Each structure stands twice: as structure tokens, then as C-alpha cells.
Amino acid sequence: MDSQANERVSDRLITLVTAVLGAGGVVPKPFPLEAQLSDLGISSLKMVNLMLAVEVEFDIAIAQGDITPENFHSLQSIEALIERTLSQRS
């Protein structure tokens, strides 16, 4: 993926995280792509919502084996998961 596509993926992920956090959530700017999402207030329930939102936003189905804490640790790890999933599809 080119850097412009990567930027769009991370921008879309930041939008999703902001939506999942809700009105009370604090989203740092610039968003730390490597920050642990749980440190930003993403609970396990919000993490499930984020995973579902990622599937809808990027039109992918995340394989059961890919639903791991490592893959949903940070925006960086989710972005890598999305890229892997999309590349397996093409």
C-alpha cells in the first residue's frame, strides 16, 4: 500500500476509535498510532464494537484466529491486520 492509502486507513481508524469512545472519550491529537488502546479508555466491550466497526468500514471479515489482543493492541496493529486481511482477499 502506498503512504497515502496508509494515511487514509489510519485516519479512518482514528474516526472509528473516536466514535467508539463516545462523547466522553478523550482522543489525543495527533493520535498516537502505537498507543495501547486500553490506555485510551477502550474497554473490552468497546473493543468488540471497534472490531465490528472495522469490519464494516473496510468491508472485511476478520478471521476468528486474528481476533487477538495483539492485533487490537493499537491503531498500528489494527492497521497491519486490515492490510493483511485485504491482501489475502486480492
Image (cartoon, rainbow, N blue to C red):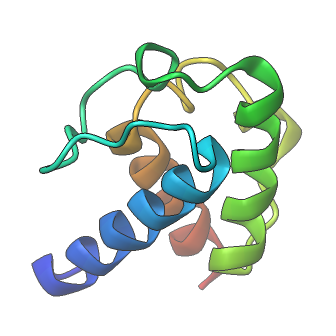
Outermost front residue: 24
Q: Quadrant of the N terminus?
A: bottom left
Question: Which residue is more in the foreground, 78 or 66?
Answer: 78
Horizontal side of 20 relative to 79 (left or right) equals right
Left or right relative to 87: residue 30: left
Residue 55 found in image quarter? bottom right
In this figure, what is the number of numbered marks?
A: 0
Q: Residue at 66% across / 77% down in the picture?
A: 57
Residue lying at 43% horizontally and 24% vertically, measured from the top left: 40
Residue drawn at 23 percent across, 40 percent down: 28
Residue 21: horizontal and vertical position, in percent?
Answer: 60, 42
Can you tell which quarter of the image residue 27 is in? top left
Q: Is residue 40 above or below residue 21?
A: above
| Residue placed most toward the observer, 80 or 34 | 34
Q: Where residue 81 sits in the image (x, y, percent)?
A: 52, 49
Image spot of residue 2 (x, y percent): 17, 82
Depth check: give the residue in front, 19 or 73. Answer: 19
Please tell me which residue is depicted at 87% across the width and 38% down the height of the picture: 64
